[in-house]
Amino acid sequence: MAEYGELQTHIVERPGLLVVTSDPWSGTSAMLRSVLADLEHPAIGVDARRCRGAMDLAMAIADRAVGEYAPEAEAWWMSTAPPSDTGGLRLARTLRSVGLEPDDLRVGTGDGTRALRQSIELLSTLREDAVLAIDHLGPLLSALPAQDARHLLETLRAIRQQFASLDFILVEYPEGPIGAALADERHPLYHAGQRLRIRRAHPSRFVTDLAITRGWTKVPVDLIGAAAELANGVPALAWSILRLAPREPDFLPTRAFHGWQELRRLTAPMTAHQWELLRRVHPLAQPIITATSVGMRPHSIGANSKSVNEGLKRLREVGLAWRTEKRYWALADPLLAAWARDHASPWAQRKSQLASTESTVRAEG
């Protein structure tokens, strides 16, 4: 609730440009959608995960703007209505009157940077005081060549200065490229906006926040707390556990555990496939996740530090790990972490058992 209120306050105050840095699987996307839906002034959100570059992002923004603020022309815009569609022709005339060629954005032709600028002009033409939220922009930027990512952020900065009545909300992962750009005096985005950090809630917050929100759920508090512990604070997984939890036995943590086991069973094929895909993320991705899942430090896998750091960086970019403290890394997906623990390689089993034994001996000593 505190994070939701803080996000809402920042957006209501019309920040100009707000960079939201959120932990993986923290529920930020759902909170952002809820805040945008409750705003009194116009707002649209775009998910950058479906985009591969500036052109895709431009088309996504334009599609969303037309669908929200010119719905009578949406079928024409998406090429599902005839060229003579009345609503489409009216929108085309409006855009051409301000110097925009609609067909470039409709079919994705031309330069991506120019298209991105035109998509914001289109949005401003339809609603000049709108809020534009671009969720998951960090992963898109990380997948681009460094120069292209810099140019995209530079374009957004220039557009923001040109259309001062619009507000931009850019969402990324911790230690991502947008936050780094804000702090880099050589970058065009330097000090261009505000920052908001949203961390994944500790499982105990699921219970303590019910003192504020208790009226909306009849689920027993202890059951919610147990599910949140098993989900490691991931809202989507916690509520999935609760939906799958049986009605018996009376001991609530046991019911939550059964729900967790059922969730793991249902997602096991996808998790196993995700595990195989890790080989393409980085050569050390699998051993890093295995080591972390059994309580070992990533650098204990026996590879050189530079390679391990690069592997951690790649895992952070794809949302599978993040640094919760200066020297501590955490896994984002509790399902993947549990699968890695159950299928740990022999070396990881030996090392984790040895570390556990040494810790016990020191404690007894």
Image: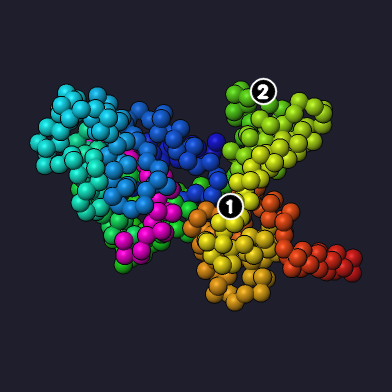
Task: Find residue 325 and report its horizontal and vertical position in percent.
Answer: 59, 60
Mark 2 neighbour density, 10 Å: few (under 14) some (14–19) many (20 or more): few
Q: Residue at x 66, y 70 (%)?
A: 301
Inspect the magenta stretch and tell me whether residue 217 lies in it: no
Task: Find residue 322 and report its horizontal and vertical position in percent.
Answer: 56, 57
- Which residue range is magenta in the image? 127-148
The colour scheme applied to this rendered structure is: rainbow
**The C terminus, quarter of image:** bottom right
Task: Find residue 9 and report its horizontal and vertical position in percent.
Answer: 42, 38
> What is the residue that sits farthest to the right in this orientation?
364
Residue that carries the numbered disc 1 in the rendered image: 274
Left or right of 259, for residue 236: left
> What is the residue that sits farthest to the bottom in this orientation?
304
Residue nearest the viewer, comparing 176 with 11 = 176
Residue type at mark 2: give it: Lys
Q: Earlier in the sequence, mark 1 or mark 2?
A: 2
Judge whether residue 123 can be spotted in this image. Answer: yes
- Frontmost of labels 1 and 2 is 1
State if disc 2 and disc 1 touch (CB < 8 Å).
no
Q: Residue at x 27, y 30 (%)?
A: 80
Residue type at mark 1: give it: Gln
Task: Find residue 115 and report its horizontal and vertical position in percent.
Answer: 23, 48
Q: Which image quarter: residue 184?
A: bottom left
Residue nearest the viewer, comparing 93 with 5 = 93
Judge whether residue 352 can be spotted in this image. Answer: no
Mark 1 neighbour density, 10 Å: few (under 14) some (14–19) many (20 or more): few
Left or right of 179, for residue 306: right
Residue that carries the numbered disc 2 in the rendered image: 218
